[in-house]
Amino acid sequence: MFRSRDVPERSRLEVKRVPDEKPRPFLQIGRTGLRLGPKNSSRRIAELQKQFRAHDHVILPEFIAADLLPLIQRQLRRLRFTSSVYLFSPLHDTADAAPSRISEFVGHGPISDGLAFLLNDPNLLAILQRLSRSPKLASFHGRLYKMAAKTGNRFDWHTDDHSGRRLAISINLSPRRFMGGELQIEQSGGQGVIEVRNANPGDAIVFRGERPHRVLPVKGKNKKLALAGWFYAAQPRARKPATSRSAIR
Ligand SMILES: O=C(O)CCC(=O)C(=O)O
């Protein structure tokens, strides 16, 4: 559980923006399954481990490879979205005293099951476990969400350190580049807030969900479509429904 003494006043923390870069893809899911960069894997994993330890996240460029992404995006067009609102207990600091609010449109369709299958690949779980130096990662569960400027949804500050969640991921599946929707993560030791964008469709951010984090609203006309979820210590049990849910389309 999140403890008040860990939390400096968030509004006073400096925000460091991680510049958009285009490093070579290393770990990818493509039409033929999981792909790991052919050369120097151990060196790349060591670099990623270092980055993860220092910054509480790593970016995996083109995590969904170019030969698979358009097929997924085609399926995403057929998704039915429902709106959900989750309320989290306040993170105990003076800047965020109100309950945190996660307001999202969640997509349901066969593609959700397909992506869940791909992200439960035991080899992927083992690599991410190594990269993040997590204890055993046994399964993945996530959901597809969309954010648009006109609906104004955002994820307020919250933590994901419950229900056996050990590691978080957010994969950008948007058909077009969007503005806003950045992920901010409060770093440990009062080091400030780091702001990350997985700007290119297919890119993923793997991050320490136990650190307080939030997603800023999307701006402009293009929406954000993402698969966000968690790697768990065990096979997840049946989940509770959201606190409010209504079909919108
Ligand atoms: O999609 C993201 O960037 C983060 C999502 C998130 O914070 C969550 O699902 O709890």
Image (spheres, rainbow, N blue to C red):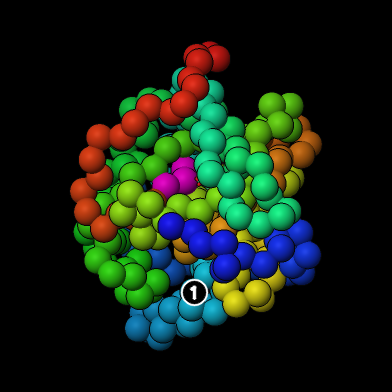
| 143 versus 135 height, above or below | above
Percent x, y for residue 172?
54, 47
Percent x, y for residue 159?
51, 54
User: Mark 1 vs ligand 1: CB under 8 Å?
Assistant: no
Quick check: 132 left or right of 21?
A: left
Q: Residue at x 59, y 33 (%)?
A: 103
Percent x, y for residue 68?
41, 45
**Viewer can see residue 19:** no
Instruction: Decide which of 190, 84 is in the foreground and name it.
Output: 190
Percent x, y for residue 27?
40, 65
On the image, numbered disc 1 is attached to which residue?
52
Q: Quadrant of residue 46?
A: bottom left
Please report the bounds of the magenta region as a residue range.
225-229
Q: Amino acid at mark 1?
A: Phe
Q: Could you tell me which secondary element the residue under label 1 belongs to? A: helix
| 15 versus 106 height, above or below | below
Q: Main secondary structure of the magenta part?
A: strand
Give yes or no for residue 227 being in the magenta stretch.
yes
Q: Residue at x 50, y 15 (%)?
A: 246
Q: Residue at x 66, y 57 (%)?
A: 93
Give yes or no for residue 126 being in the magenta stretch.
no
Give the tally of numbered discs: 1
**Viewer can see residue 217:** yes
Q: Residue at x 69, y 71 (%)?
A: 192
